[in-house]
Amino acid sequence: MSVTQDEILELLKRISKKVDKLVNSKMKNPASVAKVASAKEKIEIVTSSMVKPSEGVKERVETKKEVEERRVCPECGATEFNAVDDKTRPLHYISGTPIFAKKYQCKKCGYELE
């Protein structure tokens, strides 16, 4: 069961109203009044720190980089490539095993891009 932030905020508001009723009701014990007041403060902290989903989405969209250009084969114009190890260009070695650079081979015509 998924609960949205709006539903959580509504539930917290309802809890806060009930806490107000308890504080303003027949409570005579100062310790219980203090406990209820501290619970109310915690609820207010949670509700004030919650971010609406739409605000977070806008920030992510604005900070997202532009879409990078796709690889295009200069021979046939295709955009689908296989990544193949370029055995002539080792980048580094891990425990004696070489890690090679990649080259891209067009799936349509076989042209290789580096």
Image: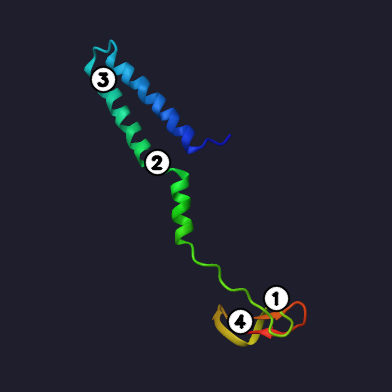
Residue linked to disc 2: 50
Circle 4 SS class: strand
Q: Secondary structure at mark 1?
A: strand
Q: Amino acid at mark 4?
A: Phe
7 left or right of 108 in image: left
Marks 2 and 3, how far apart in space?
A: 26 Å
Q: Which amino acid type is marked by label 1? A: Phe
Question: Dividing the picture into quarters, in which one does residue 98 lie?
Answer: bottom right
Mark before the other along the chain sequence, 1 or 3: 3
Q: Quadrant of the N terminus?
A: top right
Mark 3 lies on residue: 33
Q: Are marks 4 and 3 in contact (CB under 8 Å)?
A: no
Please report the residue visible at 33 percent of the width from the left and 33 percent of the height from the top: 44
Residue 107: x and y in percent read 75, 77
Q: Nearer the viewer, mark 4 or mark 3?
A: 3
Circle 4 residue: 100
Looking at this view, is 80 or 23 the one in front? 80
Mark found first going from the N terminus, 1 or 2: 2
- Residue at 45 percent across and 50 percent down: it is 56
Count residues near mark 3 (Cα–Cα under 10 Å), then give few for <14, some for 14-19, many for 20+. some
Q: Nearer the viewer, mark 2 or mark 3?
A: 2
Camera-side residue: 22 or 109?
Answer: 109
Residue at 44% x, 43% y is 52
The image quarter in which residue 25 lies: top left
Between 94 and 1, the residue placed more toward the observer is: 1
Q: Is residue 52 above or below residue 9?
A: below
| Residue at position x 37%, y 20% in the image | 18
Q: Which residue is mark 1?
A: 81
Mark 1 and mark 3 in contact? Answer it, CB < 8 Å.
no
Q: Using the numbered discs, state the Cα–Cα distance from disc 4 to disc 1 in whole angstroms.
A: 18 Å
Residue 12 higher or lower than 73, as above or below:
above
